[in-house]
C-alpha cells in the first residue's frame, strides 16, 4: 500500500516542504508540498532527486575516517570528539576569529521549479 508522508528536504537550509509516496519502506515519488506555507510546493532538482540519494547503493550510512589514504568506519561519538579536539586546538592557537561557518546554498529558488 502506498502512503503519502509530509516531510521536508534536508539538502540545504531552505528546508522545502515535500510530499513523499512510500511503499515497502521505499520512496517511490517525491514532490513539493502545496500546503507548505513557506515553500508553497517549490522544490529544486536536488529535492526532487531525494529518492535517488536515499536509495543509492553507494550511499554512506555511517561515518568514515581517512587513515593512511584508506577510509575506515568510525563511530559518531568518536567523530564529534576528534573534530572538537581539532577545532579547540585551532582556536587556542589562532583565536576564535580563525573559525567561520558556512550554511546553505546560493541556489535557493534560482533553479527551475
Ligand atoms: S532549495 Fe532544493 S535543496 Fe534546498 S531545501 Fe529546497 S528542494 Fe531541498
Image: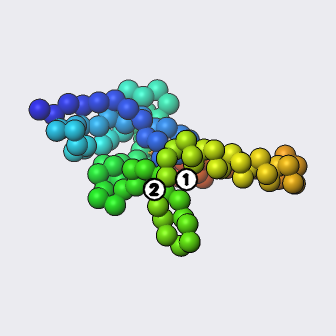
Residue 79, x across and y down, in percent: 57, 48
Q: What residue is drawn where x is 54% and y is 64%?
A: 66
32 or 76, nearer to the observer: 76
Image quadrant in which the N terminus is located: top left
Closest to the observer, 55 or 110:
55
- In the rendered image, the residue lying farthest to the left is 1
Residue 76 circle label? none
Is ligand 1 closer than 8 angstroms to the Cβ of mark 1? yes
Look at mark 1 in the image and give the residue it sits on. 107
The foreground one among 42 and 49 is: 49
Q: Is mark 1 in CB contact (under 8 Å) with mark 2?
A: no
Q: Is residue 38 above or below residue 31?
A: above
Residue 17, by quadrant, is: top left
Q: Secondary structure at mark 1?
A: loop
Q: Residues within 10 Å of mark 2 (few under 14, many from 20)?
A: few
Q: Which residue is mark 2?
A: 73
Image point (55%, 66%), residue name: 67
Amino acid at each position: 500500500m502506498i502512503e503519502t508522508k509530509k516531510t521536508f528536504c534536508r539538502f540545504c537550509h531552505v528546508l522545502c516542504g515535500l510530499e513523499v509516496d512510500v511503499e515497502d519502506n521505499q520512496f517511490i515519488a517525491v514532490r513539493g508540498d502545496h500546503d507548505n506555507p513557506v515553500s508553497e510546493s517549490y522544490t529544486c532538482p536536488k529535492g526532487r532527486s531525494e529518492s535517488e540519494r536515499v536509495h543509492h547503493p553507494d550511499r554512506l550510512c555511517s561515518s568514515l575516517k581517512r587513515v593512511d589514504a584508506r577510509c575506515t568506519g568510525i563511530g559518531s561519538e568518536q567523530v564529534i570528539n576528534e573534530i572538537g579536539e581539532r577545532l579547540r586546538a585551532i582556536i587556542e592557537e589562532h583565536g576564535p576569529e580563525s573559525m567561520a561557518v558556512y550554511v546553505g546554498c546560493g541556489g535557493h529558488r534560482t533553479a527551475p521549479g
